[in-house]
């Protein structure tokens, strides 16, 4: 079945500071502080990993500038991963300052519940209310079923769509594909994208790829598939 759609789908990765991309994606001679500019010209969205965010927050605490923010441009989408360490009192003020620096590009927080079992729903609700930002939860099927009852009246909190939990969210804006756990053929990738479109009526969809590192080849193949739908 072919799903025709004029809706925009942006492709991006979980993090962009992958050392393994040097030579295979980033040219060897490309200065490190030019890498985001190089990445952003091809992929118009990114999920800033918790490790990358922590590095940026520590720079801000030292009074240093975050140079990659200067390479953001209109309509660019930045998703930001959070964990319980970053939400501690140590980073409370600087996290707020960072979110203000991202204003205009900041799409949503992302929380991987299986990776950080210390999160509780109360903290997540408080987070969405404090920043007035969407929070996308990444969870397995069992957790999704349990939490759905608790967040059904929370308009800023939703689940992301994953390859292992497609029933977890109808009309999800965000899909996250973990390429360390899922190895799709082109046909499987096409079916996955079409199912994501079928379940999602929102006009601005996003597909983010995880991996160690995320596979640029599959990200480019996804862009090609979307252009044909």
Image (cartoon, grey):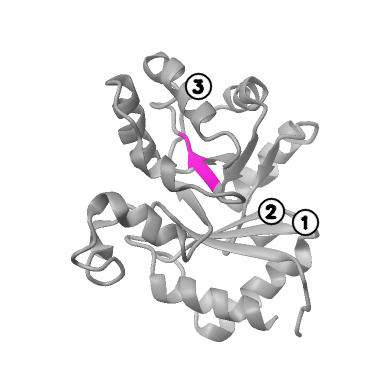
Whichever of callouts 3 and 1 sits on the residue coming sooner in the sequence is 3
Whichever of callouts 2 and 1 sits on the residue coming sooner in the sequence is 2
* Range of residues picked out in magenta: 78-82
* Residue tagged 1: 202
As helix, strand or loop, the secondary structure at mark 3 comes to helix
Whichever of callouts 2 and 3 sits on the residue coming sooner in the sequence is 3
In what quadrant of the picture does the N terminus appear? bottom right
State the image coordinates of residue 88 (x, y, percent, origin top left).
42, 19
Q: What secondary structure predominates along the stretch shown in magenta? A: strand
Residue drawn where x is 69% and y is 74% of the image: 194
Cβ atoms at labels 2 and 1 below 8 Å apart: yes
Within 10 angstroms of label 3, few (less than 14), some, or many (20 or more) residues?
Answer: few
Residue 200 vertical placement versus 82 (above, below): below
Q: Could you tell me how far apart the alpha carbons at marks 2 and 1 are, in whole angstroms?
A: 6 Å
* Residue tagged 2: 173
Residue drawn where x is 61% and y is 58% of the image: 206
In which image quadrant can residue 153 be found? top right
Camera-side residue of 132 and 101:
101
State the image coordinates of residue 146 (x, y, percent, origin top left).
67, 40
Is 226 placed left or right of 111 in the picture?
A: right
Camera-side residue of 89 and 168:
89
Within 10 angstroms of label 1, few (less than 14), some, or many (20 or more) residues?
Answer: some
In what quadrant of the picture does the C terminus appear? bottom right
Cβ atoms at labels 2 and 3 below 8 Å apart: no
Q: Could you tell me how far apart the alpha carbons at marks 3 and 1 are, in whole angstroms?
A: 28 Å
> In this view of the protein, can residue 119 be seen by the observer?
no
Q: Is residue 1 magenta?
A: no
């Amino acid at each position: 079945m072919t799903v025709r759609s004029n809706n925009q789908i942006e492709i991006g990765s979980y993090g962009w500071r992958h050392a393994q991309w040097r030579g295979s994606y980033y040219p060897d001679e490309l200065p490190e502080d030019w890498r985001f500019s190089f990445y952003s010209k091809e992929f118009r969205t990114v999920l800033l990993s918790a490790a990358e965010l922590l590095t940026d927050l520590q720079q801000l605490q030292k009074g240093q500038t975050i140079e990659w923010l200067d390479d953001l441009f209109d309509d660019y989408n930045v998703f930001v991963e959070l964990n319980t360490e970053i939400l501690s009192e140590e980073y409370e003020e600087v996290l707020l300052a960072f979110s203000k620096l991202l204003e205009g590009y900041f799409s949503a927080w992302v929380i991987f519940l299986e990776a950080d079992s210390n999160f509780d729903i109360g903290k997540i609700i408080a987070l969405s209310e404090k920043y007035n930002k969407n929070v996308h939860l990444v969870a397995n099927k069992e957790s999704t079923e349990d939490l759905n009852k608790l967040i059904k009246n929370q308009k800023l909190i939703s689940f992301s769509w994953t390859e292992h939990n497609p029933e977890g969210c109808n009309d999800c804006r965000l899909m996250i594909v973990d390429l360390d756990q899922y190895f799709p053929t082109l046909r499987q990738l096409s079916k996955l994208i079409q199912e994501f479109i079928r379940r999602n009526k929102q006009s601005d969809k996003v597909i983010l790829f995880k991996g160690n590192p995320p596979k640029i080849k599959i990200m480019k193949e996804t862009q090609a598939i979307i252009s044909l739908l």
